[in-house]
Amino acid sequence: MTVDTGRAGPQDIQSGAGVADAAKPAVETDEPGRRPKAASLRPLSRLLPFLFRYRARIAIAVLFLTLAAASTLVVPVAVRRVIDHGFSGENAAFVDQYFSVMMFVVAVLAVSSAGRYYFVTWIGERVVADLRDAVFSHLLKLSPSFYDTAQSGEVLARLTADTTQVKNVFGSTVSVALRNIVMLIGAIAMLMATSLKLSGMVLLVIPLIVLPMVFFGRKVRKLSRHAQDTLASSAALAQESLYSVQAVQAFGQEPRIGKTFNAATHEAFAAAAARARGRAFLTAAIIFLAFGAIIGILWYGAQEVLSGDMTPGTLGQFLLYAAFAAGAMGSLSEVWGELQLAAGAAERLSELLDTKPGIADPAMPVALPSPAKGAVIFDKVRFAYPSRPDDQVLKGLSFSVNPGETVAIVGPSGAGKSTLFALILRFYDPQSGTVRLDGVNVADAALEDLRGAISLVPQDTVIFSASVLDNIRFSRPSASDDEVMQAAKLARVDEFAVRLSQGFETQVGERGVTLSGGQRQRVAIARAVLRDTSLLLLDEATSALDAESEQYVQAAFEDLMQHRTTLVIAHRLATVRNADRIVVLDDGCVAAEGSHAELMKKGGLYARLAKLQFSN
């Protein structure tokens, strides 16, 4: 029988994970599932700070936009003059003049349209890149309690799909919207200059177009939000299943998982189809109302021409401006739907940005002693994970570790062993009691200073999609190649790395898939060696090693432990027989402590576990 660890908290903590939490003076209260209702396009206002960083380029884009709209609005005036003056030989020079002007106007339109497209697209791409950086940086700051309940697939869907939706809006939709707004305003102004009577009729029908747009636009936005949520849910399911594909295949659950994903994708499709129907109906209604109203107004204008109250050229000019206005209204109806989509995406992204880290730097951090000694004290600590507040993991636990001492933590599964490490690293705060490092309450220290004084070798090693050398350097990016190689030798990484196709520069694949469990763990040990801190936390550090490798690594650890405090969570009791002291945990409390020999004499839980292991 072996003693397993109690895994209640986050398991992918690495030596160097100190960068994962930054100073935020608040508590994580907003979860992806709790969404405040937002009205209209208000969530898009959250993106304005990202946009206003590039005011100069915005000004240039607006200039090109104005030139493009103005050059377009000039064309109907030329058309009216040509129609009213006719195409007789007497007016040949006049006609040539106007067509020359129109050619110049078209050239201006072409250049300004190209400029508008480039600058608006550049701004959209830049804003979304900044937004993604901000969201990802914020996600790195959120403490483990957030990820205890949030689905990583759902979070990644927001980081990718939702930011892409925002990019579509800022990269193209905003350009179309601004162009059509300017065109609509300009066309209405020119309509009024052309004929006040007909323009008055146009203004009367505008509310008939705008009101349905607003009413149905809100419904489209709700449908868009639902479609984005269902898509994110299916993405989360897919990520979780693919991440555990070996377990899925080993238990023959491919059909069931596939059926579940199929149901999720059908739900996402149904939501998207409902959104498409809503947008289609909105577009049809706007186009029918806009063009129907224009046809009616033009019929009235035709009567004015027949009665001699209006020239054909004036009606033609009015017709073109009316077409411009109608086209702008039709485009704006589609743009409104796109903006509704973006508002839903911005709302989801805002929820992430508004989520505050539960663990934050204190207002006035207390400096840790320098040089650090590595003394650790648990004083009447009570703790329950936020996701399980009624399940007390630690129940008034107290013990201390002296500088330079090697202390082993043993106990049955669920006793709270790994929780001790999570509290020392301050991934969580206890509900009562204190954890101290070198006499300083860890809650009073700056997170960067606290975690910079600690090295961790976890049982579940995280390997990144990079080279062996870069994976070791992860714990101290500024380390030289010689320092990394020295750490690799101490952890026996060189033993297998030199046999790889490109040595230490070999790419190990996603999550280190090309390495064995023992090789991955030796990389984690090398990280801790390279970090070289006063306090070393070993969480089943040799559990995945074969007997020969374990012997070499234990020898390296003996040298490493001589000048630092070491806490060891023991899986095999034989590996901690020589520890200075062994602390036995049971049901969240210290059941006993002492040397191996002392605990064997006392009997109790440790003696029973030792006999079961050593007798096999």
Image: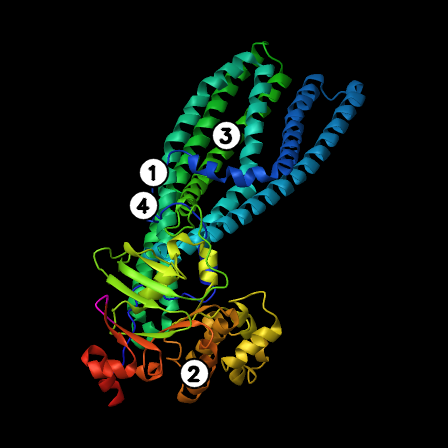
Q: Element under label 2?
A: helix
Point out the tag, 4 or 2, that comes first from the N-terminus. 4
Judge the density around disc 4: few (<14), some (14-19), many (≥20) Cα neighbours within 10 Å: few
Q: Nearer the viewer, mark 2 or mark 1?
A: 2
Point out the tag, 3 or 4, that comes first from the N-terminus. 4
Left or right position of 178 against 154 = right
Q: Is residue 587 magenta?
A: yes
Image position of 216 with respect to 2: above or below? above
Q: Nearer the viewer, mark 3 or mark 2?
A: 2
The residue wearing badge 4 is: 34
Q: Nearer the viewer, mark 3 or mark 4?
A: 4
- List x then y, in percent, for residue 564: 45, 72
The residue wearing badge 3 is: 329
Q: Which mark is residue 385?
A: none
Per the model, the C-alpha gap separating discs 1 and 3 is 28 Å
Pointers 3 and 2 in contact (C-beta within 8 Å): no
The residue wearing badge 2 is: 554
Please give the range of residues in magenta: 585-589
Which amino acid type is marked by label 3?
Met
Per the model, the C-alpha gap separating discs 4 and 1 is 10 Å
Q: Nearer the viewer, mark 1 or mark 3?
A: 1
Whether residue 513 is visible, yes or no, is no
Query: Which secondary structure type mostly characterizes the magenta part of the structure?
Result: strand
Image position of 241 with respect to 271: above or below? below
- The residue sitting at 47% across, 81% down in the picture is 556
Judge the density around disc 3: few (<14), some (14-19), many (≥20) Cα neighbours within 10 Å: many
Q: Where is residue 431, by image quadrant?
A: bottom left
- The residue sitting at 70% across, 37% down in the picture is 111
Which amino acid type is marked by label 4?
Arg
The residue wearing badge 1 is: 37
